[in-house]
Structure formats: C-alpha cells, structure tokens
Image (cartoon, helix red, strand yellow):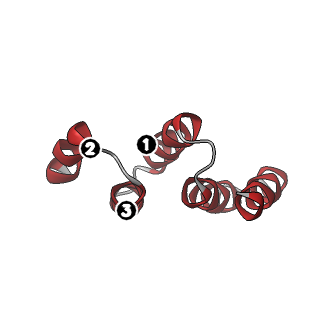
Amino acid sequence: MVHYRTAAKVKLDEALLVRMAVALEASGALIDAADLVHAFHLQNPSSSVAARLAARLAADRGDWGRAAVLLDHARAS
C-alpha cells in the first residue's frame, strides 16, 4: 500500500484506483476502500470505473438500491 499511496500523490488515475481499492479490500480495510472510491468518484463523476467499483462495494454491504443506481450511472457514462 505504501507504494500505491506514493503513486496516488503524483496522480490517482483509474488503474491505480482499482489497484488501491483491491489492496485495501484484501487487507480488510473495506471502509477505507469505499472512502477512496467515493472521493475519486466525486472528483471524477463521469468515471464508469469508479461507479462500477462503488456499486460493487455497495452490493458487498447489501445496499442493493445504491448499487443499482451506481450501475445505471456507470452504463450511462
């Protein structure tokens, strides 16, 4: 994660977002993963990658309504 965080300070793009979110989830930091994806999606509302990641995280929490809205947004992006 240290290397990912250092890279994110330079430029957080979609590919790095995915790697960081997966690494955070794998380490059990689900809230941190969700916060990271949410912050990226706020800054990049047209990112279908961020919308799909956010939808998956919402589904993992059982928030099916939010997951559906985010997937619709991802499809429209």
Instruction: Examine the image and state in which quarter residue 41 appears.
Output: top right
Q: Secondary structure at mark 2?
A: helix
Mark nearest the camera among 3 and 1 is 3
Q: Secondary structure at mark 3?
A: helix
**Amino acid beneath label 1:** Asp
**Amino acid beneath label 2:** Ala
**Amino acid beneath label 3:** Ala
Q: Secondary structure at mark 1?
A: helix
Identify the mark at residue 32; answer none if there is no mark: 1
User: Residue placed at 77% from the left, 59% from the top?
Assistant: 76
Identify the mark at residue 64; answer none if there is no mark: none
Circles 2 and 3 in contact, beta carbons < 8 Å: no
Residue neighbourhood size for the residue with mark 2, other residues' Cα within 10 Å, grouped as few (<14), some (14–19), many (≥20): some
Which callout, 3 or 1, points at the residue further toward the start of the chain?
A: 3
Where is residue 69? Give x, y as percent. 81, 53
> Horizontal placement of 44 versus 46: left or right?
left
> Horizontal placement of 61 versus 16: left or right?
right
> Horizontal placement of 16 versus 2: left or right?
right
User: Residue placed at 75% from the left, 64% from the top?
Assistant: 75
Where is residue 30? Give x, y as percent. 47, 51
Identify the mark at residue 15; answer none if there is no mark: 3
> Horizontal placement of 56 versus 3: left or right?
right
Which callout, 1 or 2, points at the residue further toward the start of the chain?
A: 2
Residue neighbourhood size for the residue with mark 1, other residues' Cα within 10 Å, grouped as few (<14), some (14–19), many (≥20): some
Residue neighbourhood size for the residue with mark 3, other residues' Cα within 10 Å, grouped as few (<14), some (14–19), many (≥20): few
User: Residue placed at 41% from the left, 61% from the top?
Assistant: 18
- Compare residues 35 and 48 and report the one nearer the observer: 48
- What residue does disc 2 label? 8
Where is residue 31? Give x, y as percent. 49, 43
User: What separation in Å lies between label 2 and label 3 (alpha carbons)?
Assistant: 11 Å
